[in-house]
Amino acid sequence: MASLPLGAKVRMTEYRIRQWYENYGGDVYISFSGGKDSTVLLDIARNLYSDIEAVFIDTGLEYPEVRKFAKSFDNVTVVRPELNFKQVILKYGYPVVSKEQSQYIMQYRNATSEKTKDTRWNGNKYGRGKISEKWKYLVDAPFLISDKCCNVMKKAPAKKYEHDTGKKPIIATMAFESKLRESQWLQSGCNAFEATRPISKPMSFWTEQDVLQYVTEHNLKLAKPYGHIIEDIDSGDLKTTGCERTGCMFCMYGCHLDGSPNRFDRMKKTDPKIYEYCMKDLEEGGLGLRNVLDYYLGGSNE
């Protein structure tokens, strides 16, 4: 499915959106982050149903320009989490490496049984579910680590909104983004009608190039941090001149893969005040990311 031409993918995505919309009598919404993927999803959905609602979760972690962009659309409902990022990291810990690895590190540190601790250190009988060898040094980090940020700041307010309104979400996640998302898609398909939390992911089989091609062909406007879409001279692939992905400004997941300059180096140039807030020690009113990044990236073999 990933190798299909864009036109075919658009038609398949439209079909899945119609299925979802009709199944729930229109009581559905688009999860709209202001990022390029959800901008494409919203465009496709509103070409079918012009009145479909978009929901923007204002976590306070987005680029200011992305927040402004998301709120500039019509029929966008804004919801907010109960805790801010600083409260989350103080209560649960910092998001480093990946959701999976930060979860394993947290579980190892908080284990109440030797079995759990052994599994997280050595893996199960198949060698899975363990802290990667290269990240084991992080269990001794002088700061809390967890995967709770996304759950508290994004999933919880979305679930509350769904509980309060009865509406079912349509989101723009794609399987290629992680092994976990690929596995989930292979198990439930694009429209998970039978899931505990029913959710539609009608762009699951899209790729990054598909998204950029759609934006170009339909002349869609993107949030400012992306810059412009150009063709790479060497590969011929489309790429953005600014950020490849926007997401949460303060998130450190995958920072070891960024190369130089990394996301925080770029932030220092584009948003110096936010950068200073991120790097300043907790005791001085900041987020304390400087010390976390020094420990996290300093011990990495990347």
Image (cartoon, rainbow, N blue to C red):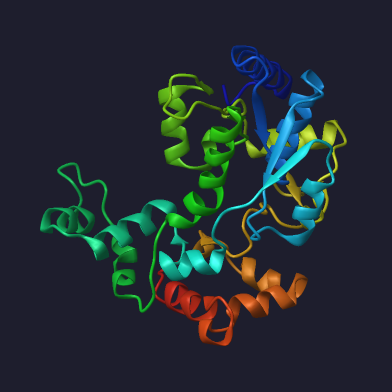
Q: Is residue 206 left or right of residue 99?
A: right
Q: Quadrant of residue 17?
A: top right
Q: At which x and y percent is residue 131?
A: 29, 58
Q: Residue at x 40, y 24 (%)?
A: 187
Question: How many callouts does the rendering have?
Answer: 0
Is residue 295 shown above or below 3? below
Q: At which x and y percent is residue 133?
A: 28, 62
Q: At which x and y percent is residue 190?
A: 54, 23
Q: Quadrant of the N terminus?
A: top right
Is residue 202 shown above or below 208? above
In this view, the residue farthest toward the bottom is 284
In this view, the residue farthest toward the front is 164
Q: Residue at x 48, y 64 (%)?
A: 88
Q: Is residue 38 visible?
A: yes
Q: Quadrant of the C terminus?
A: bottom left
Q: Is residue 93 visible?
A: no
Is residue 279 shown above or below 82? below
From the viewer's side, name the closer residue of 263 and 22: 22
In this view, the residue farthest toward the left is 114
Q: Residue at x 47, y 67 (%)?
A: 89
Q: Is residue 45 left or right of residue 16?
A: right
From the viewer's side, name the closer residue of 146 and 27: 27
Q: At which x and y percent is residue 45?
A: 74, 25
Q: Is residue 5 left or right of residue 111?
A: right
Q: Quadrant of residue 141?
A: bottom left
Q: Residue at x 82, y 23 (%)?
A: 50
From the viewer's side, name the closer residue of 25 and 3: 25
